[in-house]
Amino acid sequence: MLEILYRSPKKSAYTLIILMAIFSAIYNAFIPLHGDEAYYWMWSHHLQAGYYDHPPMIAIMIWLTNHISQSEWGIRLVNVFSFTITAFYVFKFTKELSDEKTALNAVLIFLSVIIVNAGYIITTTDAPTILFWTLTLYYTYRAFFFGSWKEYILAGIMLGLLMMSKYTSILLVATILVFTLLKKRNILTNIKFYTAMLIALVIVFPMVWWNYKHDWISFAFQLHHGASSVFKINFGSFFTFIAAQFGIFSPVFAWVLFYYLYKEKLFYKNDKLFFIALSVVITIGLFLYKSLFKNMELNFDAPAYIGGVILVAYVISKYNLKKTFKVGLIIALIFTIIGRYMFLFHLDIIRTEMYKSDAIIHRVETFARPGDHFYGDHLSIAAYLKYYLPGHPDTDVATPSRYSQYDMWRKKDFLKDGLVLTRNHKRGAALRKLYKHVKLIDTNIVVPKRRIFYLYRVSDPIKK
């Protein structure tokens, strides 16, 4: 099979990328929204320069896809577009460093690993981050080693868009600065370098200004979200994070990447390879350190694997690791096929927060009366209600929950008569402190012993 693909590497790579995009768009139509997706979709109907949880790029991109479709598959066009363009640039980048056959291998690795396939499915801030991380990495590389005005300008634009996608993008900024100081100090006297930085700052300025106007609330949230207040070493989370890398990038490819990052001196002697390796080491290294104190989510270091894919493909080509590549590809595909199958047919097992969310909200609709307001007990439930109820009514969080964008938008006396959907029977006591009349009208057992929804009718808010 691989021999057939190698006959025309570029055509094969492009064909696989397009087929993956078509397959993912169709596949995504059969999966209900995750709570975060509904939350970000809600943002797209309230565009602004920043949000409590993240920069605005995810909302902007969903707003664009809304013009095509606001269905599940339409929202997820953000991921399909982002990862498709990323895959093309993985081929382009690897080809410039090596040859078309190596570039095809890079695309095969990229499309086979489970972390990328998960990225094709769920719309999160990682989708635009992966896209603009890849574009920034590529055009910064071009600017460093070829130095035209066009490449510096494009690098500045992509860096700005990257910083508007997710705050962890600062790690690629760190990569660029470290590489400049170690290998390209002459660039510090180049006007093109400062022009690129200025362009990036201009693009990022609205988001920074929004944070300034809101007491840096978004920056503070992310610093707290990714950090631990107790500096007590937890080897459990540390080794879990390490093991997870062998799962999300597949055991063989992860082993090749980490082994040759340690062994391969060429990465450090060849400036082009060193630049890519640095983006991997700085990103994974930071989260590896942080995992000593706190559990790290599997997607935190995902951008590192853009450089990881390129380096693994390069090593496989350089050392002619044909058997290693085939075994790695088979294992990665097995992981991915199992993951996609489970996601499609056993969603309650792998992600109870998503299970039949559309069916739950449609059941709420049968109890609705004219003039009702709708509330959840968490941002995801409130966002689900807004997305799946007819007419997309405004929703809110009724009971105390973690601070979110709802709290920033909320007006005084927001509690009205209506329905409250919760996932915890104890919320009834909390609601009775807010309303004079609270009645449990429905109990929806979605997943026995694991997921039960409670629907309350509330009226006469208690004035405070």
Image (cartoon, rainbow, N blue to C red):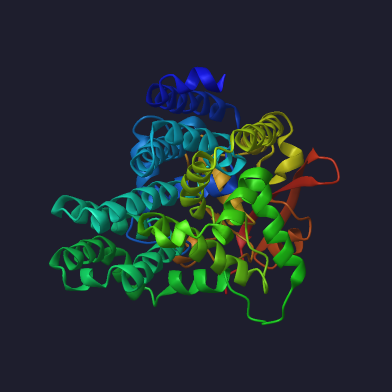
Q: Quadrant of residue 122?
A: top right
Residue lying at the far right of the rendered structure: 449
Q: Residue 442 vs residue 308: left or right?
A: right
Where is residue 357 shown, x and y percent of the image? Answer: 64, 38
Q: Quadrant of residue 69?
A: top left
Q: Quadrant of residue 166?
A: bottom left
Where is residue 263 shown, x and y percent of the image? Answer: 57, 59
In the foreground, 292 or 386: 292
**Residue at coordinates 35% horizontally, 72% vertically from top-left?**
182
> Considering only vertical position in the picture, is 182 above or below 126?
below
**Residue at coordinates 64% horizontally, 33% vertically from top-left?**
323
Where is residue 237 shown, x and y percent of the image? Answer: 72, 66
Residue 315 visible in this rendered orientation of the protein: yes
The quadrant of the image that shows the C terminus is bottom right
Q: Residue 236 vs residue 270: left or right?
A: right
The quadrant of the image that shows the N terminus is top right
In the foreground, 288 or 311: 311
